[in-house]
């Protein structure tokens, strides 16, 4: 039986945001979890996805060699061949190509790193997606555990669209696995990265299923989302539920070039001075009394709270 395949386009004009890494991981995860058959398409002339696929031992997901002007026709051919999900990786900074590819998208995924530099580059891609009225999901990629900027990135992005509740953290296994044609889950099934990838796919799969469901009752057949509360509550720890955060990772905001105005930690409280008259009660600074010449309106300790004091 042939039917419509769903087309997910990974786009962002910023090079290095994780389009190739995240799209390859989503394709493998989708295939493994039964959403396939999955076909991958690389529209980037640099061919990073193609290189990854060529280094791959497994034959799935399939790799479809196509050119952008023939994309519409080739998507139809893939549908006729029985492919259910088509994942397209795109090049950075080539607006006309990205715009053309997005016309075929059922869902656009925009990976972005949590950095001011990457956030500034998001606008033009968002404009293209919104002009074509396509559903958009931001995925925060390469985040550092506990870094405040991850949450701030999520808030900034949420002004422009949906932010995936699962964040992919910066880990060397993402980069290492891509070199030999694998995914983090294929290197180690039990790694934190692998569980983030599985959770992110579960979220995207759910979005795609809701788009497919012509009858809302179809959705009742699905088991409830298990990752929802764990991943949605804290962007900084999304996908890491039940696991300890990496202790060896330094917060991004502590690294050069990542400090945002207003994000620096407040200075530490000064240590209490050795005051020999201290009566055992810590008072706020305001307790030092009114400015010179003003009446002291503070209540004395014996005056009751909650009643108007009359002299
Ligand atoms: N979560 C991550 N952790 C560590 N390295 C990553 C992560 N995501 C991407 N990378 C690395 O960053 C670089 C750029 O990623 P890539 O997927 O090629 O971006 P794009 O396709 O958007 O240009 C690659 O070397 C990749 O291995
Ligand atoms: Mg790429």
Image: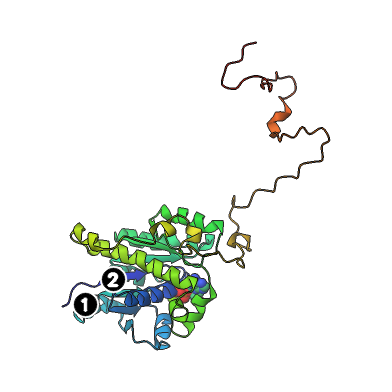
Residue occupying the point 72% across, 26% down: 289
* Residue 276 shown left or right of residue 56 in the figure: right
Identify which residue, 258 or 237, lies in the foreground: 237
- Which callout, 2 or 1, points at the residue further toward the start of the chain? 2
Picture layout, residue 131 above or below residue 75:
above
For the question of whether residue 168 can be seen, the reply is yes
Residue 149 spot, x, y in % from top left: 54, 57
Residue 87 spot, x, y in % from top left: 33, 74
Mark 2, other Cα within 10 Å: few <14 / some 14–19 / many ≥20: many
Residue 209 spot, x, y in % from top left: 27, 64
In which quadrant will I find the C terminus? Answer: top right
Q: State the CA–CA distance, disc 2 to disc 1.
A: 10 Å
Tell me the quarter of the picture where residue 219 sits.
bottom left
Picture layout, residue 167 above or below residue 62:
above
Q: Is mark 2 on a helix, strand or loop?
A: strand
Could you say which disc has been placed on residue 79 in the image?
1
Residue 292 spot, x, y in % from top left: 75, 23
Instruction: Please identify the residue farthest to the left as the structure is shown.
Output: 1
Tell me the quarter of the picture where residue 134 sits.
bottom left
Tell me the quarter of the picture where residue 226 sits.
bottom left
**Labels 2 and 1 touching (C-beta < 8 A):** no
Instruction: Please identify the residue farthest to the right as the structure is shown.
Output: 276
Judging by the rendered image, the residue that carries numbered circle 2 is 7
Q: Is mark 1 on a helix, strand or loop?
A: helix
Mark 1, other Cα within 10 Å: few <14 / some 14–19 / many ≥20: some
* Residue 245 shown left or right of residue 293 in the figure: left
Picture layout, residue 135 above or below residue 302:
below
* Residue 207 shown left or right of residue 288 in the figure: left
């Amino acid at each position: 039986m042939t039917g419509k395949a769903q087309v997910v386009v990974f786009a962002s004009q910023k090079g290095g945001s994780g389009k190739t890494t995240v799209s390859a991981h989503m394709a493998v995860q989708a295939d493994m979890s039964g959403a396939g058959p999955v076909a991958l398409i690389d529209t980037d002339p640099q061919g990073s996805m193609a290189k990854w696929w060529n280094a791959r031992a497994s034959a799935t997901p399939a790799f479809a060699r196509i050119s952008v002007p023939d994309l519409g026709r080739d998507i139809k051919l893939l549908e006729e061949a029985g492919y259910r999900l088509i994942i397209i990786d795109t090049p950075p900074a080539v607006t006309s190509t990205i715009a053309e590819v997005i016309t075929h998208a059922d869902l656009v995924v925009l990976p972005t790193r949590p950095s001011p530099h990457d956030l500034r580059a998001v606008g033009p891609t968002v404009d293209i997606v919104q002009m074509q009225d396509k559903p958009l999901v931001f995925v925060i990629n390469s985040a550092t555990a506990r870094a405040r900027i991850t949450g701030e990135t999520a808030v900034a992005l949420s002004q422009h669209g949906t932010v995936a509740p699962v964040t992919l953290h910066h880990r060397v296994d993402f980069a290492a696995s891509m070199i030999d044609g694998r995914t983090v889950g294929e290197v180690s099934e039990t790694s934190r990265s692998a569980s983030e990838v599985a959770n992110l796919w579960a979220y995207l799969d759910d979005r795609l299923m809701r788009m497919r469901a012509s009858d809302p009752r179809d959705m009742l057949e699905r088991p409830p989302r298990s990752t929802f509360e764990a991943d949605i509550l804290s962007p900084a720890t999304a996908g890491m539920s039940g696991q300890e955060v990496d202790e060896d990772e330094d917060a991004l905001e502590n690294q050069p070039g990542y400090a945002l105005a207003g994000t620096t930690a407040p200075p530490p409280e000064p240590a209490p001075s050795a005051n020999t008259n201290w009566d055992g009660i810590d008072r706020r600074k305001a307790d030092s009394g009114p400015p010179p010449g003003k009446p002291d309106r503070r209540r004395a300790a014996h005056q009751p709270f909650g009643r108007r004091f009359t002299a």
